[in-house]
Amino acid sequence: MRWGVVAALPRELKPTLARLRAKRLKNGFHEAGPFLFAAGGVGATKAERCALAMAEQGVEVMVSTGFAGALVAGLDPGTLVLGGTAGVTLRTARAAAPDARE
């Protein structure tokens, strides 16, 4: 299974790429084992474009990572924010953490 890891900015991926000794590919992505990494740029349009490009490279599971959580007051470091099919994910998250903020 090939995993895709997307961030907006290269600096969000830099420590991971270094630790995994990821190699840079001609298309601008980085690869380490089953993982394909990309800094797609800021914004939903760029993120979507990047995710589609990764899917074309055989990525089956997509993980979005970054620092944007720091922009939300009260979101503690290390908090996991789940995405997916909005209704299902939101219901699952609410059931698991009824006191969490949206």
Image (spheres, rainbow, N blue to C red):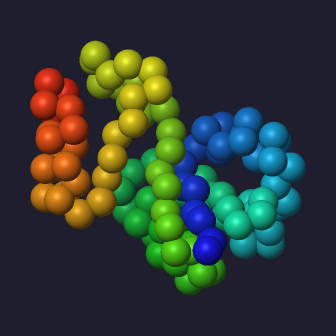
Instruction: State the image coordinates of residue 2 (x, y, percent, origin top left).
Output: 62, 72
Q: Quadrant of the N terminus?
A: bottom right
Quadrant of the image for the C terminus?
Answer: top left
Q: Depth check: 60 or 42 in front?
A: 60
Q: Residue at x 13, y 31 (%)?
A: 98
Residue 7 at x, y percent in the picture: 54, 49
Query: In the image, is 39 to the left or to the right of 96?
Result: right
Q: Residue at x 21, y 38 (%)?
A: 96
Residue 41 in sight:
no
Report how many numbered discs are placed on residues in the image. Answer: 0
Query: x, y percentage for residue 44?
Result: 35, 56
Q: Is residue 37 visible?
A: yes
Q: Is residue 20 above or below residue 31?
A: above
Q: Could you tell whether 48 is left or right of 92 in the image?
A: right
Q: Residue shown at 37%/62% (left/top)?
A: 45
Residue 47 sits in quarter: bottom left
Residue in the picture at 49% in, 63% down? 62
Location of residue 56 with respect to 73 vertically, above or below: below
Looking at the picture, tell me which residue is in the foreground, 23 or 50.
23
Q: Is 34 on the left-hand or right-hand side of 101?
A: right
| In the image, farthest residue toward the front | 96
Find residue 41 and report its horizontal and vertical position in percent: 52, 52
